[in-house]
Image: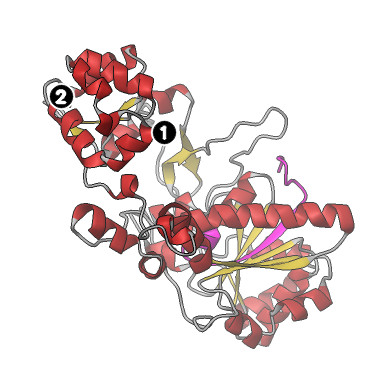
Amino acid sequence: MSGPLAGVRVVDLTAVLLGPTATQILGDMGADVIKIEAPGGDATRGAGAARNPGMGSLFMHINRNKRSLVLDLKQPAGLQALMKLLQTADVLFHNMRPQAMARLGLAYADVAKLNPGIVYCGAFGYGQGGRYAARPAYDDLIQSAVALPHLFERSTGHMHYTPINLIDRLIAMKAVYCVTSALFHRERTGEGQEVELSMFETMAEMVLGEHLAGESFDPPLGPAGYGRSLSPSRKPYKTSDGHVAAMIYTNRQWQRFCEMAGKPELVSDPRFEDNGARGRNMDQLGEIVAGVLITRTTAEWVETLQAIDLPVMAVNTLESLIDDPHLADVGFFQWVDHPTQGRIRSMRGGSTWSRTPAQFTRQAPLCGQDSVDVLTELGYSPEQIEDLMASGAAGQVSPHPAPDTSEKPPLR
């Protein structure tokens, strides 16, 4: 492995989406990520399209650059193997509730006795000082707790969740910088530490950073809610053949739009005279812009608005996003040959590095694919490994037959 985290070993005691997304980023940055799976594997192995059982598309897109070790932590021998592994680790990342970690004897105090320099990061639902501390948390629950369905209802009239597991992915990114910051501290001081990351508090700060509004002051200057974000007109505009996103922020952009639209009198309209006024009158502004943009095609508006330096973007579908020409320009997609799953489409992250770039070096592993290798590294003999496998304390699945990839269609 190469990359900025080369030489860092991460024990990944996570499942589903938040934790695996975070540890994949660490793996992309060069860390040796060892994913601990219970017998039967991560629940997301069955999520999404799949050529073979246990290798669903969602799992494969959040578990590259990892090795899979199956351990039954309810068995003393499986837990002992994990303890041996933790003595070699730089990071333990988990997304279990702390009460469950404590029952396994894996609380920070327990692990720090084995490895005082370890960075022990837990990402879970709620901060441990509050009444929700022991509650389970999933993306939809946290969306509800931080008022996202309510915000949708205020802006659209309908209460619903975001159609992507947004909370898990946002918390995963924050978890990565918590871990890397703790590693930086350890590099300077030699000190390990425990980091707890709460989904609820993290997202509450994000939501209220925008929507605390008048409630920011004592006494309040008005209700909570940022009007521009909540305006029903804050949505893509219809064109004659589709939709387009267009933004008007600056006075110069408003002037150019009015001149282009043949409505110069609106430039001096007090409702729209500056960005603050336009934000307060977002609904009226949206009606005016919508009435103009419905008159031409999306392609025509993209060309016209770009010509007057107005921020604009066509609205992609999932299908057109896959075919987006910019993504092709930057080499966002790559076809890779998975040793057991055939040809799969891989995506790279959005960062570029001049010296230590993130890399795709391992494809998503089968459940327990690396159990023997990791246990051997820990000093287990072949006979001991065989005993662990026979008892069910460790495990390894039989590989699927590799599909034929001799005929490779072009990457679109």
| Residue denoted by label 1 | 406
As measured in the structure, the alpha-carbon distance from the residue carrying label 1 to the one carrying label 2 is 52 Å
* Residue drawn at point x = 38 percent, y = 62 percent: 53
- Coordinates of residue 252 in the picture (x, y in percent): 37, 19
Query: The N terminus appears in which quarter of the rendering?
Result: top right
Place residue 116 in its image quadrant. bottom right
Identity of the residue furthest to the right in this view: 189
Callout 1 crowding tier (Cα within 10 Å): few <14, some 14–19, many ≥20: few
Q: What secondary structure is marked by label 1?
A: loop
Q: Which secondary structure type mostly characterizes the magenta part of the structure?
A: loop
Q: Is residue 46 left or right of residue 134?
A: left
Q: Which residues are magenta?
A: 1-20
User: How far across and down, in percent of the image, does residue 341 sit?
Assistant: 43, 49
In front: label 1 or label 2 = 2
Picture disc at residue 292: 2
Residue 296 % position (x, y): 14, 20
Amino acid at pointer 1: Ser
Q: Residue 312, located in which quarter of the rendered image?
A: top left
Q: Is residue 336 above or below residue 326?
A: below
Comes first in the chain, label 1 or label 2: 2
Which mark, by number, is residue 65?
Answer: none
Number of marks drawn: 2
Estimate how packed mark 2 is, as few (under 14), some (14 to 19) or many (20 or more) residues with alpha carbons within 10 Å: some
Please tell me which residue is depicted at 53% across the width and 39% down the height of the picture: 349
Q: Is residue 295 above or below residue 163?
A: above
Identify the residue at image location x=54%, y=81%. Answer: 133
Question: Disc 2 residue type?
Answer: Val
